[in-house]
Amino acid sequence: MESLLKSAISDQLPFVIYRLPDQKKVNVAIQQSKDLPFYSFDDLDDLKGFIVAPFRGKKVNELICLKPDHQFVISEDSDKLLEITKGIHQIHSAETDSGYVLTKDEYLKRAGYLIEVLKAGDLRKVVLSRVLEHPLPSTFTWTEFFQNLLEAYPKAFVYYISLPGFGSWIGATPETLLSIESDHAETVALAGTQPADKFSWKEKEIKEQQIVMDYIEELLFKNGITEYGRTGPFTVKAGNVVHLKTVYNLSLDQLQGKVGKLIASLHPTPAVCGLPRNKAYDLIQKVEKHDRVFYTGFLGPWNLSGDSKLYVNLRCASLHANKMSLYVGGGLTAESVAEAEWQETIRKSETLLSVVEKM
């Protein structure tokens, strides 16, 4: 196992290390070829591997499928995990530029502009993101960072992935896009953010969550999925913040042959893009100077070791030799206050930064 991962690192082969929420086992998947062709969302019904889709996948209908030649599982508590992952700090850094880093004044101007657009009534919601560059201490290792993420966020999907041409990314995300179990499928509406230590849901967050719920229920109807269970909204904790969450349980019979079409409808969700989606997406391309790359895309094992689970890629960073580029964002509505939204992005960045600062 250790030699396989060492070879993948030295040869810069595609590989991923990940842990599903509420599990204690860490999965490793390695592809022997550097070839990573793009597939369309319609191919999802037949694909098998680890799926990674960029935010722009909405526009180009493209995703990547890492097809592993080697797979193994290690206990999260095992010393073996430390042994096999100790070389990942040597992996090539992100080959794409981290993008434009906004100053606070620039962010407030962009957020203020978007809020005025929202007040004009053309849009109900739009998500503004930004990139933070954080220098790493000399004692920092990606191995320790990954293991600390596993411990800090047991209910998140935690991953480390390296893809030729895209570099290496790490993250801990709380949001399911689509999960298929033996007897049902599940998707969620997740929106609204408050500090975990003192939160009180206000009209802005409740409205934001309702927007996402309405959108998902409309999409389910359009895809002929009319029989489903709904639980929520309820409060869930994700690191130092809490969100509102609603869970939808779907019938597998109604989902048959519609997976690719449903994913194309869901991605990007209103929680990471806005509504109406096409208008919000176009406005994001106009206002944001950076490329989101995999941030607010989706990823996860698909027909792999019995798992078909895709997650919205939140709380993530691209990796560089001496720094990490963190991607954070927040949903704006007509009731938003630009300064409060800036503070929300800071709180979200602490999901990863709080782990770095303990090292």
Image: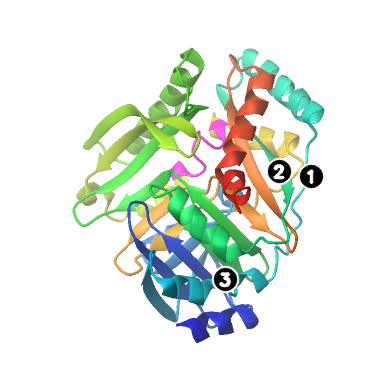
What's the amino acid at mark 1?
Tyr
Q: Closer to the camera, 333 or 98?
A: 98
Residue pictured at 71% horizontal, 43% vertical? 131
Report if residue 40 is visible in the image: no
Mark 1 and mark 2 in contact (Cβ < 8 Å)?
Answer: yes
User: x and y percent of residue 50 in the render?
Assistant: 45, 65
* Residue of label 2: 131
**Is 271 one of the magenta-colored residues?**
yes
| Marks 2/1: CA–CA distance | 7 Å
Instruction: Name the dominant secondary structure of the magenta segment.
Output: loop
Query: Element type at marker 2?
Result: strand
Span highlighted in magenta in the image: 265-274
What's the amino acid at mark 2?
Val
Dot in front, 1 or 3: 1
Q: Is residue 304 left or right of residue 315?
A: left
* Residue of label 1: 100
